[in-house]
């Protein structure tokens, strides 16, 4: 909320400038009073007693007038010095800050010519030099871009390949820090997340995070040792496999492949990291176990029946002249046992077939693609016109596309035979975690018996047949199908209820922030990262950050105002990771203030039923673990978090950097340090203001622009940044 930023203060000169101003005032005073005082002392020292008495008699009556004139002259001189100081000293200091902006953070920034003519001419000359510098830099950038084109192409190919792989792939350095992962890994580990890690992007997979928060360290260390031994022996296949258990009891099959170092000074076969491919095998093991049980029951049951048949047949062969009644009884035994075996075999095959059906692969597919494919087949094979209405083109389904399209075509073919329909329409709409796919036509009513027959019989479209029924396909998708009439429109439709592929595959926040998914998932510079705790003497560029913002019911945390939204993004290796974000509404368990709603746009209906702070704060704590916190006017946000420590037991103990204080360090002579003004100076466009995630993104961009400016001032470590921040005026603001 913008109102929570401390009020803008008048320009305050830097410490050195204030010292120089004080020295100038002292010199002025000495120049105005010194000559008179020294002259008076010399005359007084050389005069005799009668002369001194005469001097006192002459001067004392006029002393007040002299003091008043001296004071007036001193004040006038002070005003002139202050004016010249503001125009030439402070003006040049402000110009120097603007020049640093042009040199580093915002090359499009230009100095505004203001002040005395000499300063304005200097500003204009500076802008001319900046324009020439930009021309040279554009030329250099163009040459660099051309040289890097082939490298970027290879990188994009790798990013595309990793993103589209059906397997979960994670690449780590030797410390277990994640430097690459694909979309499948993101989905898989989010599905396995439990507790606080399952809330609002709190899943622990992310660039720079440790793989040991997901997989057991001991098993990975053992696999690495196996790989090293095979490398030492010169084995052909240098791969290690193991099965581990996730936190929720899911079984994961993991394959580890080394990444060999290519540095000139590294030993042969020296590893710089490893690639993990992860597969969740829990369901397949359960299916295998079920098939084993079915086959075992078939074997055990058949063994007894075969024994009985063997005895009965033996008696019939050994005693050909036995009585008719006894022979009939033995034949009945054979017939009964054969019937039982046949029934048992049919039941086993039925169960085994169901097990095979469950092995169909379900993939994320755009719902519109299913409809387009069905329309093409219907028009080409059945010669029937088709149209669409009320289609959500952004809706993704979790489906097996071939069987689903075949089912739609089969229903359409039977409608043509049954009702001679002239046209079929499609409708696709979301309904929570499900999607409604409707096949609509105009025609007579259909009996429930007819629909039941269509649902359970094997499907056929022209000469193409399938042993599966519509019910088999729907059950495999975990969905439902029914027939319904639209009496007012004289239409009817089949409704297929299918699972939606969100939120894991295409979450709302993923699409809202950026359309580029792949580039967020890899950073090969992290191969050089080494695991260590947050060291205050580490360079700022080497640290990982969580930049966050909160929206609240009001501006008084100690008076009962509550958090209603937390948004955050991560910065790793000098890059903001938009996809690795935290964005969660919080139920404040109280009504919102109307004046706050006008600022952030969050209403009571939006937060009602959302997780409360007891659930959200632990998830946010997990999200920002092992990172430095960054916020704009962080004292405000941190006060809200600190007041919840006793209630939630969650303590944020890591260092905190404040972009408000850092701006005061960098630009002490600027008029304002509000987020909008800082972004304007740095050439950053803010989108989504007064939304926690939008403000966090803007603060991240501001902070990244500040890092090179801090480096220029000699502030290169976390400790130096914290100490410099605490010396600013704004550090005294408390909430």
Image: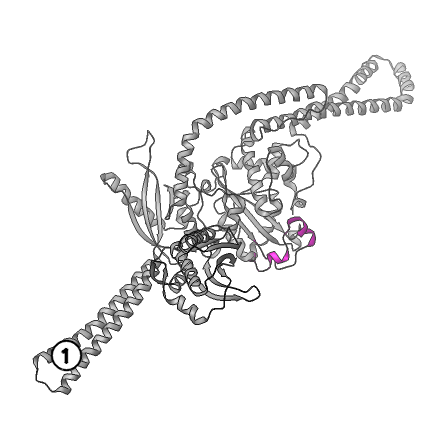
Q: Is residue 588 magenta?
A: yes
Is residue 175 something one can see in this rendering? no
Q: How is the image coloured?
A: one colour
The answer to whether residue 335 is left or right of residue 400 is left
Q: Is residue 560 visible?
A: yes
Nearer to me, 212 or 340? 340
- Mark 1: few/some/many CA within 10 Å (<14, 14-19, 20+): some
Question: In this picture, is 382 found above or below 539?
Answer: below
- Residue at 44% of width from left, 64% of height from top? 480
The magenta segment is: 585-612
Horizontal and vertical percent position of residue 478: 42, 62
Question: Quick one: 629 or 197, which is closer to the camera?
Answer: 197
Side of 5 where 697 appears, left or right: left
**Image spot of residue 302 (x, y percent):** 21, 72
Q: Could you say which quadrant of the image residue 457 lies in?
A: bottom left
Residue 613 placement (x, y as % from top left): 56, 56
Residue at horizontal 14%, vertical 86%?
326
Residue 384 is one of the magenta-drawn residues? no
Left or right, residue 624 beside residue 157:
right
Residue 449 sits above or below residue 108 on the image: below
On the image, the x and y values in percent for residue 505 come to 45, 51
- Seen at 32% across and 41% down, the residue is 258
Looking at the image, which is closer to me, 607 or 229?
607
Q: Which residue is mark 1?
A: 312
């Amino acid at each position: 909320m913008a109102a929570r930023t401390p009020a803008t203060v008048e320009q305050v000169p830097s410490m050195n400038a204030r010292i120089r101003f004080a020295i100038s005032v002292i010199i002025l005073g000495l120049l105005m009073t010194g000559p008179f005082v020294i002259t008076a002392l010399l005359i007084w020292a050389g005069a005799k007693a009668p002369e001194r008495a005469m001097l006192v008699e002459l001067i004392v009556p006029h002393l007040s007038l002299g003091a008043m004139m001296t004071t007036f002259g001193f004040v006038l001189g002070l005003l002139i010095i202050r004016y010249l100081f503001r125009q030439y000293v402070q003006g040049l200091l402000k110009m120097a800050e603007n020049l640093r902006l042009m040199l580093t953070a915002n090359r499009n920034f230009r100095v505004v010519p203001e002040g005395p003519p000499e300063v304005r001419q200097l500003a204009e000359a500076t802008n001319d030099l900046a324009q020439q510098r930009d021309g040279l830099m554009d030329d250099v950038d163009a040459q660099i871009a051309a040289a890097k084109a082939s490298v970027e192409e290879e990188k994009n190919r790798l990013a595309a390949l990793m993103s589209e792989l059906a397997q979960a792939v994670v690449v780590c350095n030797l410390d277990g820090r994640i430097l690459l992962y694909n979309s499948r890994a993101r989905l898989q580990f989010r599905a396995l997340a439990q507790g606080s890690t399952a809330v609002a992007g709190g899943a622990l997979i992310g660039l720079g995070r440790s793989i040991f928060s997901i997989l057991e360290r001991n098993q990975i260390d053992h696999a690495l040792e196996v790989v090293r031994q095979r490398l030492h022996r010169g084995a052909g296949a240098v791969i290690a496999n193991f099965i581990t258990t996730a936190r929720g009891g899911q079984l994961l099959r993991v394959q580890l492949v080394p990444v060999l170092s290519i540095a000139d000074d590294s030993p042969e076969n020296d590893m710089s990291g490893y690639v993990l491919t992860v597969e969740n095998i829990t369901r397949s093991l359960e299916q295998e176990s079920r098939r084993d049980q079915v086959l075992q029951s078939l074997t055990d049951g058949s063994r007894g029946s075969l024994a009985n048949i063997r005895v009965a047949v033996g008696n019939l062969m050994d005693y050909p002249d036995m009585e008719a009644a006894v022979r009939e009884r033995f034949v009945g035994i054979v017939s009964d046992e054969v019937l039982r075996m046949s029934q048992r075999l049919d039941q086993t095959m039925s169960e085994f077939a169901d097990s095979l059906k469950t092995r169909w692969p379900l993939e994320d597919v755009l719902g519109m693609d299913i409809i387009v494919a069905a329309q093409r087949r219907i028009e080409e094979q059945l010669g029937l016109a088709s149209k669409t209405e009320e289609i959500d083109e952004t809706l993704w389904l979790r489906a097996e596309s071939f069987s689903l399209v075949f089912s739609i075509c089969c229903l359409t073919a039977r409608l043509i035979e049954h009702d001679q329909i002239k046209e079929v329409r499609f409708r696709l709409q979301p309904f929570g975690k499900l999607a409604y796919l409707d096949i609509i036509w105009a025609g007579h009513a259909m009996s429930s018996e007819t629909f039941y027959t269509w649902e359970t019989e094997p499907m056929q479209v022209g000469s193409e047949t399938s042993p599966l029924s519509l019910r088999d396909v729907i059950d495999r998708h975990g969905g439902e199908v029914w027939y319904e009439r639209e009496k007012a429109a004289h239409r009817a439709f089949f409704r297929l209820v299918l699972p939606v592929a969100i939120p894991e595959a295409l979450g709302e926040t993923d699409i809202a922030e950026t359309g580029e998914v792949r580039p967020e998932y890899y950073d090969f510079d992290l191969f050089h990262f080494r695991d260590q705790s947050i060291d205050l003497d580490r360079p700022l560029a080497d640290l990982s950050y969580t930049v966050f913002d909160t929206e609240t019911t009001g501006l008084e945390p100690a008076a009962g105002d509550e958090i209603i939204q937390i948004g955050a993004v991560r910065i790793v290796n000098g890059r903001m990771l938009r996809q690795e974000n935290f964005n969660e509404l919080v139920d404040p368990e109280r009504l919102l203030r109307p004046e706050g709603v006008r600022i952030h746009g969050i209403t009571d209906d939006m937060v009602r039923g959302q997780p409360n702070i007891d659930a959200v704060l632990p998830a946010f704590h997990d999200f920002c673990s092992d990172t430095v916190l960054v916020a704009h006017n962080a004292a405000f946000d941190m006060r809200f978090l600190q007041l919840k420590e006793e209630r939630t037991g969650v303590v944020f103990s890591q260092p905190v950097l404040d972009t408000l204080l850092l701006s005061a360090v960098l630009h002490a002579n600027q008029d304002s340090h509000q987020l909008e003004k800082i972004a304007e100076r740095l050439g950053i466009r803010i989108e989504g203001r007064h939304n926690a995630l939008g403000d966090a993104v803007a603060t991240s961009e501001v902070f990244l622009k500040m890092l090179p400016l801090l480096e220029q001032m000699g502030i290169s470590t976390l400790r130096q940044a914290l100490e410099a921040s605490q010396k600013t005026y704004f550090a005294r603001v408390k909430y």
